Image: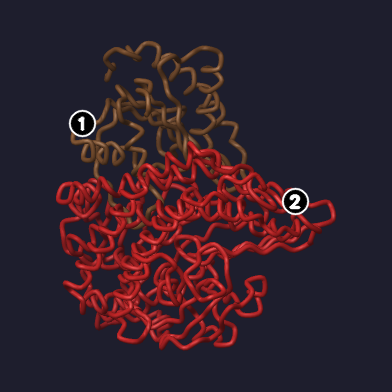
Chain colours: A brown, B red
Amino acid sequence: MTERPAPVLVFTWGNPSRGDDALGPLLHDRLLEKQAAGRLPGVDLLTDFQLQIEHALDLRQRDCVVFVDASVSVPAPFGFGPLQAEEDVAYTTHAMSPGAVLSVFSRVEQRPPPAAFLLSIRGYEFGLGLPLSAAARGHLDAACVFLEQWLAESGYPGGSCVTG
Amino acid sequence: MSNRLETAENPEQLKRVVIEPLTRVEGHGKVTLLQDEDNRIRQARLHIVEFRGFEKFIQGRPYWELPVLVQRLCGICPVSHHLAAAKATDMLVGSSLTPTAEKIRRLMHFGQTLQSHALHFFHLCSPDLLFGFDDEVRHRNIVGVIEDHPEIAKQGVLLRKYGQEVIRLTAGKRVHGTGAIPGGVNKSLDRGERDYLQADIEQIIEWSQGAVDLIKQVFLEQLDYHLEFGATDSNMLSMVAPDGSFDIYHGGLRARDPQGGTIFDHVDYTRYSDYLQEGVKNWSYMKFPFIASLGLDNGWYRVGPLARVNNCDRFTTPLAEQARGEFLAIGEGRPVQAALAFHWARLIELLHCAEAIRELIDDDDISGRELVQRGDMQPVGIGVIEAPRGTLFHHYEMDDDGLVTRANLIVSTTNNNQAMNESIRQVASHYLDGNRLTEPMLNQIEVAIRAYDPCLSCATHALGKMPLEVSLVGPDGQVRDRLEKRAGDVVCPTPA
C-alpha cells in the first residue's frame, strides 16, 4: 500500500510558538522551500511538536536520519554529531529523546536503527508567544547552510553515511 | 480527605527533601518533603509550573483562529485543546453541529484518546506494573518492556500510530490540524479513508482487549498492594452523557463524593463557575480547583480516567462495559480510589475508544457533506471536553469585532492538582521514613506522579530528558544528601 520512503529523513521538532523552540520547525520550512526548488533529492522532511514512540516507525526503510532540535546547552551556533540508541527514563509522557526513539526502533523492528545524527541549534528564549531571537535566527542560517551541504556530501541518498 | 501533612506547625525546624526534575526550559515539577527531627514526613508538596501567559497569547486574536492557535499550548495534547476551543467557538457563532460535524469530531477525539492512552500505558505505566517498583531503573522503561514482552511493546507503538492516523484523516494534517472550525468541521471522510481505517480496526480492538486483560491480571495479582499505593479518598468529577453513560466529547458535569453519593449531576458546563472555584495557596503558582458547595478543604476532586470510569453509569460499547463491571468490583460498592487504578481505568477507555472508532467508521454520516452550521453570534463561548488526562475547560469572551478579550482555561492537571499532592503525601508517609535518599524511594514518588501523567506544559520538548534531582537539606539549610537521575546514567550520587 505504501511505496518505499526516501532513504534520508530529516526530522525536526519543537513548538513554533515558543520562541527559539521554533528552530526545528523553521529549519523544516526552509528545507521545504529548497525541495520545492528541486533541491534535496532523496530526502523526506517531517516535523512534530514532540518526539514520541510512534516516530520510530518513520525510521523504517531509511538509510540515514538527521534529528534537528533547539538546545540550550550546545555551543553556538550549532552542534552536529552521530547519535546512538539510548534508554530513556521519564515520569511523564511529555518528553522523549532521539536516542530513545532509535532504541524503540531497534527493539520493535528487531534490527539496528539507521545511521542517525543530531543537529542541535543553540537557542535562548522559549516563552510562549515569543518570537525567534535574533541570535537564534543567525544560528538557524548557519545550521541550514551546513545541513544542506552535509546532505550533499555525505553520500546520501543511496550511499554509505559518513559518520565522522 | 485530610490535609494534615500540608502545613506543619513548625516548618523552620524541619529537614527538607527536594525532588526536582530539571528541565532546560520550563514545565518542570518538584517534590518537596519536609522531615522532622525524627525523620518522619511532615510536609509533602508537589510543585508544577503551570503554563502561564496563555491569556496574553490569546487576547486580541480573532475568535476563528482559536481552534488552531491553542494547539500551540501543549505538544502532547494539541487535539484536546483544538476540540475544546472549537466547542467554545461553536457557542460564539451560535452553532448547533450537523451530525457529520459532530461525528467527525468525536472520531478525532477517540483517535486522540486512544493514542494518548496507548503512549501512557506502554511507555510509562507498564514497566511499573510489569516489573515492580524496585526493578532496576535501566530495565524499567519501554526498552525493558520490549525485551521481556516484545509483542506488547510493538502493539503499543502500533496502537499509538493508529490513533495518529485517525487524527491525520479527521484533522487534515499529522500535526497542527485544522479539522474542527467554528460551527463544524472542514472535511469529512471519503470511502477510501474509511476503508483505510477499517482495515486495521479489528486488530486494534483485539490488542486493546489484550491490554485490559493484562492490566487486570497484574493488578489483581497484588490486589492489596495496588489498592493501597497512593490511595486517597476524593470526590470525582467528569462529564457524562444525558443518560449517564460514558461520554468524553459532550455532556453534563457529574460530581460524586468518596462514597459514591451524588454532589451534583447533569450540570450544564457553561455554568461551571457556579459549581467550581479555583483556590490559591502561597507555595504554588498552580491553582487548586474545588467544588464550591464543599469548600477548599473538602471540595477538591479527581478527574481523568479513574473519575470517568467510576462516575459513568455504563459504557455504550460491549467490551468496555464488561471491563467496567470487573473494575468496579474491586471497589466493593464504593468508587475505586487507588492511584494505580488510573492505569486500569485508562485501558478500559482505550478499549472503548477502539470500539467506538469501529462504530463511527461504519456510520455513513462521517461521509456527509453538511459540514458547518452557524446561527447568531454570542459574546461568550465555553467549551468543555474530557481530555485524556481529565476535564478540560476553555472559556472565551470576545468584542464586537470578534477579537478575544478574555480567556480562562482550566486544564486537566490543574483539576488534579490537590489529588496529586494527596497521593504523594500518602506514598511519602509510607515509604520515605528515613534520612537517606535511595533510588527505590525516588521510584515510589515517580510511580505516584506517573499514575496521573501530569501535563508539564512542556510544549517545549526537553532535550535534557528531564533528569530528576533529589536533595536532602537539614534544618541548618545545608545539603546533606543528593541524588541525580538521568536517562541512561540511572542514579548517581553527587557531592553535597
Query: Is B296 left, or right, of B447 in this rendering?
Result: right
Q: Check disc 1 and report the residue beneath it.
A: A112
Look at the numbered disc 2 and give the secondary structure of its residue: loop
Residue at mark 2: chain: B
Residue A38: % across, % down? 52, 12
CA distance separating discs 2 and 1: 50 Å
Q: Is residue B7 visible?
A: yes
Image quadrant assignment for residue A156:
top left
Q: Are the residues flagged by discs 2 and 1 in contact, CB closer than 8 Å?
A: no
> How many numbered marks does the figure carry?
2
Q: Check disc 2 and report the residue beneath it.
A: B60
**Same chain? Circles 2 and 1:** no
- Kind of residue at badge 2: Gly
Q: Relative to B182, does residue A149 appear above or below in the rendering? A: above
- Kind of residue at badge 1: Pro
Q: Relative to B410, does residue B330 appear above or below in the rendering? A: below
Q: Badge 2: how crowded within 10 Å, few (<14), some, or many (20+)?
A: some
Residue B125: % across, % down? 29, 60
Q: Which tag is nearer the camera, tag 2 or tag 1? A: 1
Query: Is B185 left, or right, of B135 in this rendering?
Result: right
